[in-house]
Each structure stands twice: as structure tokens, then as C-alpha cells.
Image (tube, rainbow, N blue to C red):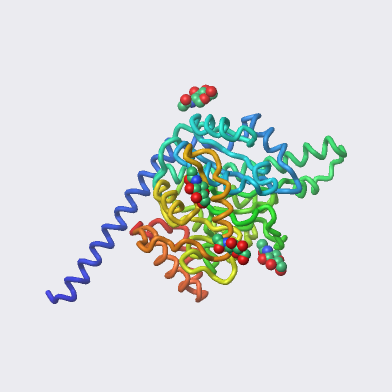
Amino acid sequence: MKRSSVIFWSFLVVILALVLRKIKIGYDAMQYVRGCAHEVSFEGIMKDPIFIELIKNFEFESPTMIIFLNQYALDMTFNWLCNIKDMPNAHKNLLVITLDNVSDKQISTTWPNLKRYNMAIPCLKDRFQSGGGRYQLFYLLRANIAKAIDRFQSGGGRYQLFYLLRANIAKAIVKLGKPFWMVQQDTFWLDNLLDLPLNNTESDIIFDRVGEIPLIAGGYYYVRPTQKSLKFFEKLSEDLEVSYKQDSTYMTSLCSRDDLAKCGFVPYSILSNWAWLDNPSVKSPMIIQLDCETQLEKKLDKMKSLGFYFLEEDEKSCNVSAVKEAKSHVLNRTMLPAVSEKSYSHTQLIIYTWIIQKLHQHYITEFILNKIVYPYAYYFMFTI
Ligand SMILES: *[C@@H]1O[C@H](CO)[C@@H](O)[C@H](O)[C@H]1NC(C)=O
Ligand SMILES: *[C@@H]1O[C@H](CO)[C@@H](O)[C@H](O)[C@H]1NC(C)=O
Ligand SMILES: *[C@@H]1O[C@H](CO)[C@@H](O)[C@H](O)[C@H]1NC(C)=O
Ligand SMILES: *[C@@H]1O[C@H](CO)[C@@H](O)[C@H](O)[C@H]1NC(C)=O
């Protein structure tokens, strides 16, 4: 055999092995979801009067922000809570959903004034692994919560209307829902997300993005309680329960459909990510998602090395001067240089982003992305 064909066949075998590995991982993940889906079901969420009461008390005027955590994300969460502590209403408009009793206890003792909701889901109390069953289950849970809030708000609007005006204008029910932000704590805030003007009022859901491309990052999204956003999350939840999907790419795919929600984007220059740190542009973003690492401990270490660590030695109280310093560094674009050695997962993300960016430039490849690649993104990203 010629040398070049040996190389070709070896290459093919390696790719095949990597894809088969993904199929196995996907199969295992779905087994996990099948075993645990009942713990995160929409019906279960809607049955809990404590949850219903919480949502009822959401404001109409300013959206509530929702984060999730289990005990392994406590450090990250404390760090972020310190980051946003002095921003008006940031803590007041936050709902912390804890997934185990340990994190619920820790949050309640350190930050007693936060709104909390403890779900204590046994299937979600352990460490998450990217692409694993816990993540899939978590995505499903997130979709169900979003669905529950949406659904409830149709009902909730009805409730409000009943008490306030006792009028029965059915149309108003939908309009009177409550908006919310799904947010993530592995981020740095230069400014308050609640101050972000959301101009694109026709959009049912407004997403963050991976770069200057219409690919959803999925850490942050804003939801208007409309029938269409309800439909969107119903579809998302339905599909996440039965098939192995990455929610951000799958949501991108759902956004490309005409029959679900109308999706909008927050400009990447405002709601940015790690890539900005590699190459600070002219303007500082409002928020930087530090999602360059898939492992949580590494992520916090990296944040430390970049000057985004805001805790005192007790790993709970806030180092106020550290927050100030980080803000002025981001504002002046004088951050510590990112550790020159990029991790394997960081490098891969850069490569995938670059490829996707190229594919979005033509409508045919974009169509293929939306219809084939994004719904099955896990299998295409076979090296991660
Ligand atoms: C968590 O706390 C609740 C209420 O105190 C209790 O019913 C439940 O058994 C606890 N779960 C675990 C896993 O300890
Ligand atoms: C809203 O409009 C202003 C002014 O045109 C713009 O600077 C800002 O980026 C827009 N915000 C969003 C979220 O699109
Ligand atoms: C708090 O932050 C300041 C400024 O960044 C830093 O010099 C100091 O070491 C930090 N304190 C602790 C306990 O880490
Ligand atoms: C950022 O710029 C302001 C105003 O020019 C200055 O007061 C501040 O010291 C700078 N901060 C850093 C960390 O360079």
C-alpha cells in the first residue's frame, strides 16, 4: 500500500473510533436521562406549591434572573454573587435554584436574603461531566423550568387579573406574563445585566451568542412569556427527553424554524465570552462568559489567574477591592494576560468556533448546520 493511503485509512479509523465513542457516550447519557427524567418532570415542578408561589411573586417590570447550582458549583456561585453584590437589584432579582441540600444550606447561611428554591434532585447532586448524562438531564431540567415558568405565567397572569380587575380578557393573560433571564455564574459582570436595554421587542427569546455568528451560547437567555416561547420550550423539553442533544446548538436549530419562537440576540460586543480576553476589542463588554474550560475547578483556577477571583480566604466573604480592581482592568483593557498556555478544551473550542464561523458565511452550509449539524452537534464535535 502506498504511504498516503495508509495515512488516509488510519485517519479514517481514528475518526470512526471517535464517532463510535460519542455514540456510546450518547447512549449512556440517554440511559441516565431515562432513569432520572421523573425527577425533573414538568408535572413534578408544577405540583410544588412553593415553586408556584415563588413565580407568582416574580415582578412584571424587571425580569428575575435564575441560576442553578449543586455543591460543586458553590465556589463559583459565591464568587459571582460577590461580583454582582453592589449592582442595584442584582441580588434582589435573583432566584437561586439548588440541586442538593448541601448547596441549599450553604447558600442560605452565607446569603440568607437571596430567593432560593431547593429541588434536591438526587440525580443531579454529583459532579457534571461535559457531554455526560448529568448535563443532558440538567438541560432537560432547565427546559422544563423555563416551560413551567412560561406555562405558569399564562396561568399566573390569569390569577393576577382575577384579583386586580376581575376582568376576563383572555388575550391579556398571555401579555401579562413575567419575563426572566436564565443566567450562569461562571461569568464576570462589568455592568448590571438588568440595565441592558432589550430593544428587539418582537423576539420571544433573546439569546447570547458564541461570536459574531448566529450560534447560541446558551449560558444567558431572556424569555418573554409568550405562547411562542412556551411552544419553543415544550419542543425543547420533549426532544431533550428522548434524544441526545446539546441544548445550545439545538436551540439554535429550533430558532431557525418558522413555527416556534422568534429568536433575537444580544450583541456579542455586549454579552461576550473568553475570546474577548484573548483579543480585547475597542469596547469592553458588559458581561464576559468565562466558559473556556469544561471542568469547573480548572475554570475557577483560570479565573483566579485572570484576576476574576473575588473571595476572601474563607472562600465565602467578598473581597470588594478585588471586584473593583477587576472592573477597572476590564474597563481600561489592562487585564492580566491570559495564561499563555491554552488548555486542550480551550484550543478545541477556538477551532470549532472558527469552523462554524466559516460555515455560517454561506446559506447552504448554514442550512446544513441548522438542520443536520446542530441537532446532532455532539456527534460532530467528536474530539471533545
Ligand atoms: C434534603 O432535605 C430534605 C428536607 O429537609 C429531606 O427531606 C431530604 O431527604 C434531604 N435529601 C437528602 C438527599 O439528604
Ligand atoms: C439597544 O439599542 C441601543 C441603541 O441603538 C444599542 O446600543 C444597544 O446595543 C441595543 N441593545 C440590544 C440588547 O440590542
Ligand atoms: C483582595 O483583593 C486585593 C486586590 O485585588 C488583593 O490584593 C488581596 O490579596 C485580596 N485578598 C485576599 C484575601 O485574597
Ligand atoms: C483605569 O483608568 C482610570 C481612569 O483613567 C484610572 O483611574 C484607573 O487607575 C485605571 N485602572 C487600572 C487598573 O489601570
Q: How many marks?
A: 0
Give the residue displayed 12% in from the left and 74% down from the top.
1
Q: Position of residue 328 (x, y in %)?
A: 58, 59
Q: Position of residue 8 (x, y in %)?
A: 22, 71
Quarter of the image where ligand 2 sits: bottom right
Give the residue displayed 77% in from the left and 46% down from the top.
176
Of 293 and 323, nearer the camera is 323
Specify whether residue 175 is in view.
Answer: yes
**Is residue 263 rendered to the left or right of residue 360?**
right
Of 132 and 17, nearer the camera is 132
Q: Is residue 268 above or below residue 316?
A: below
Choose top left, top right, bottom left or bottom right for residue 204.
bottom right
Give the residue displayed 69% in from the left and 45% down from the top.
89
Choose top left, top right, bottom left or bottom right for residue 267.
bottom right
**Is residue 245 rendered to the left or right of residue 43?**
left
Report the quarter where the C terminus lies. bottom left
Q: Position of residue 380 (x, y in %)?
A: 38, 61
Of 57 and 240, nearer the camera is 57
